[in-house]
Image (cartoon, rainbow, N blue to C red):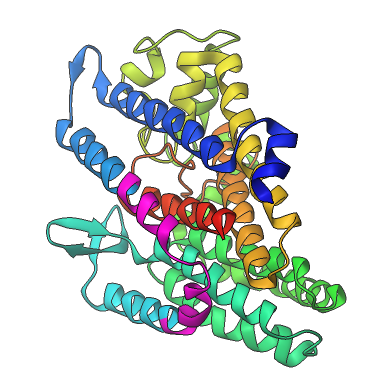
Amino acid sequence: MFNNILRLKTGLKPAKIIIVCLIFFTILSLSSIYSSLHQAGAFTDQEIFYKEIMWVVISWIVLILFSLINYRTYFDLAYVLYAINICLLIAVDLFGKSALGAQRWLNIGGFNFQPSELSKIITIFFLARIFASETNKGFFKGVIVPFLILMINILLIVKQPDLGTALVLVFLFFLMGFASSNKKRYFVALIAAALIFSPFAFNHLKDYQKKRLIVFLNPNAEPLGAGYTIIQSKIAIGSGKFFGKGFLSGTQNQFNFLPERHTDFIFTVIAEEWGFLGAIALLMIYIFIINNILLVARYQKDNFAQLLLIGMACLFFIHVFINIGMTLGVLPVVGIPLLFISYGGTHLLVSFMLLGIFLNICKQ
């Protein structure tokens, strides 16, 4: 049925849509990461680039494997996987590897693995099962209890610290909650309570997180400190103009003015090299993928599958919206990678897992 629906809407089967888009993302990701490491004509950090190639190959294999696993398996394993993820986050706190002032990684066989990224997909399983299991559970059992259980995960991630991923999980809870059969006023009440107490949370932020919020309001407050990256990002994006400067020709990128350009600020590299036209083309492909996921969700009769797809679409949208927003300076910098493009093995792996699940739901 879904194949016929998508043929009418797009002229293509969902599997073909996903494969074509992922091939485009893979090429753009590798070329952008190569460019971000190709400083002033000398290719540096070759190990990073080759690691990304390896992660891309593994991610494509994972996509195929997850497309073969019946999505109902995640309904049965949701609680078990959530408990395992909590154990991994505790292991990060006890034995994790530190870098750039954060302790977020476990070293497994020479590879750095980030359990907080895995939390995103497991949170979608967990919330989809809870919200799909029964209807009209009431405010306490249907909203408060799941939120308190999820807070265990969120607090462990905040402790790393990884405020960006913690916020993503909070957004997933409310967006999937609104999409569920629970009464909407329950979630509105919880949001109102969170907004009332949010000013008190500012005092518990790390110093660098406070600086990011201050810089968000006024980047020129620390032009050579916390505001430097945002200022350079805006300069790079603006200098790309309509058609861009061309591959390996971005001055802010090639002359090492822009920090973190192969990870959180890779959109800046794309906008500088390919201009407004390239940035809009990238956004249109993101919209195309998210729209097709929601289209399949719309025609689902299985509540669990529907919530899985909605959670997947919400996660993709959050990543794109926040990452591009922070590179443009319209949102605070919170360390969210650009979907399918930024350097990072765990993030890429999780994204391909989700699309593998999407393909399986389409086949069932």
Judged left or right of residue 221, residue 171 is right
Determine whether 65 is above or below 302 in the image: above
Judged left or right of residue 112, residue 324 is right
- Report x, y in % for residue 93: 30, 75
Residue in view at x 55 percent, y 79 percent: 151
Q: Nearer the viewer, residue 212 or 145?
A: 145
**Residue 332 seen in the figure:** yes
Most extreme residue toward the left is 109
Task: Decide whether residue 63 is among the magenta residues.
Answer: yes
Q: Nearer the viewer, residue 45 or 128?
A: 128
Task: Decide whether residue 70 is among the magenta residues.
Answer: yes
**What are the residue bounds of the magenta stretch?**
60-80
- Report x, y in % for residue 251: 39, 13
- Report x, y in % for residue 64: 37, 50
Residue in view at x 27 percent, y 77 percent: 91
Determine whether 138 is above or below 81 in the image: below
